[in-house]
Amino acid sequence: MLPFSMFIFPAGRVIRSLCDSGEVRYSLTLEGFYPGYLHFKWTCGETEDTDIISSQEHYTDNNNLFTVCSEVIIPQTDLTCSGSTVNVHWEHEYTDSTGREKMCIRDSDFPWRPAVEEVQVPRLFHDTLVTLQCDISGYYPDAVSVTWLRKNKENQEICEDSASIPQTSSHKTTDNTYSCTARLTITPTLRVHQGAEYICRVQHPSLQKAIEKSTGRLNMIGRPQMDPIQMTLVDNMFIQFCLTLKRFYPKDFKIKWYREERQPREGVRQGTKHTETITEDDDLTFCVTSECQVWGSSFADPQYKLYVTWEHASLDGPETRTLSVRDFPWSPMLGKINVPTLEDNQKSALRCHITGYFPNVITVAWFKRERGKVSAAPVSSNMAAEILPHKDIKALFACTAILYFTPTIEEDQGSEFICRVEHPSLEQPREISTGPLEISTLF
């Protein structure tokens, strides 16, 4: 046994560890002292003049030299102030010598400072809701504070963005530290946000000063918004196509018009002349109008195509619209068949006005429905068809389809005549019926 005069006063080392319960354990281990009893005093707070924390000590004896481990459990609420300090004092029962350790949450060796990643900035589109986000991890206690600031391009003034919606919510990780994703939802506009900068400022009790991560200067784009392509007849021979794309940014834009070849070659399209007009709107976005004229008779073939393609920095690749006669607003409209008073064995005429079509390619056929069956109206000495073309009030094409026939009570009473019209702009023919005919006698 060592004599009392050989007392060895130990030095200590404190280890911090996190508990699954969400508290932190402070452990002080002292080795190689004799005799085997030490007195410990633990306190926690912004000053040392605080209540003593209850501790537990575990002693072991190794050939008359003793080791002790003293532990305390401290709730994280006691560490949420920047001045939070854990103090431990120890002294031996046979000497006036004391030891002490003072551990502040802002000490350089505090292990659970927040790690802040770079701000993730998606593509920013003018006047379109977007979310900036910044990942923060590895901190304890759960007392992180996040502020989003905007630095204006013109005067470099930094201000908190009151129009934005910040979101931050911590969650516990497998190592008992905390992490969160700080999000900021904004609706950026060119006038306010182009060239500006957002700063994510993270504060935590363990930090001497806040950590800041910047987006860098914001670079915005505007995706073009397409109006329906307008079509206008010019001199009743040409069709003028007008494409309008609005609210795009930056200004650089490419538009090309192509038409189908008369004798198609694979992969080849013939360019078509067009004009472009670009204007700037009050919100700093741009608008382009592109106009192209095409010979109208080309569209007599339903398979004939006109293509318009545009490219812009905001798009993932070129966008194309294909136009054919099926897109025209000028498809034939059928009026009600004019049925005169029909008399047995007296020559009559049925008339149907067809208006508003372009190009001037139309097919009219007459059919007869009797006893539930429909068949083509037979051409004979008693029946003939005629088409009289004319222009309608909108300078489109129109005609009157006429069916001359001599009705008889025996063959035509209660039957119907149908006028069927085909045109390149129609996927299916249009038709109209007279309804059941009523034929009277001369008596």
Image: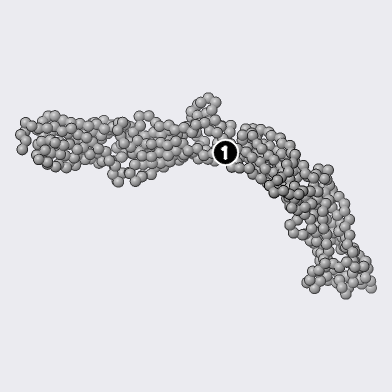
Kind of residue sitting beneath label 1: Phe
Q: Position of residue 428 (x, y in %)?
A: 74, 59
Picture quadrant where residue 279 is located = top right
State the residue at coordinates (61%, 35%).
Answer: 249
Q: Position of residue 22 (x, y in %)?
A: 31, 44
> In this figure, which colouring scheme has been used for the structure?
one colour
Q: Position of residue 425 (x, y in %)?
A: 76, 53
Locate the C terminus by quadrant: bottom right
State the residue at coordinates (38%, 41%).
Answer: 179
Report the front residue among 299 and 434. 299
Image vertical order of residue 5 relative to residue 417, above or below:
above
Picture quadrant where residue 379 is located = bottom right
Q: Residue furthest top?
A: 155
Question: In this figure, which residue is indicated by the disc labeled 1?
Answer: 125
How crowded pointer 1 is (Cα within 10 Å; few <14, some 14-19, many 20+) is rated as: many
Say whether residue 210 is left or right of residue 100: right
Residue 74 appears in the figure: no
State the residue at coordinates (30%, 33%).
Answer: 109
Q: Residue furthest front?
A: 265
Which element type, helix, strand or loop, lies under badge 1?
strand
Say whether residue 434 is left or right of residue 245: right
Q: Position of residue 222 (x, y in %)?
A: 60, 37
Q: Residue furthest bottom?
A: 410
Residue 313 appears in the figure: yes
State the residue at coordinates (79%, 71%).
Answer: 373
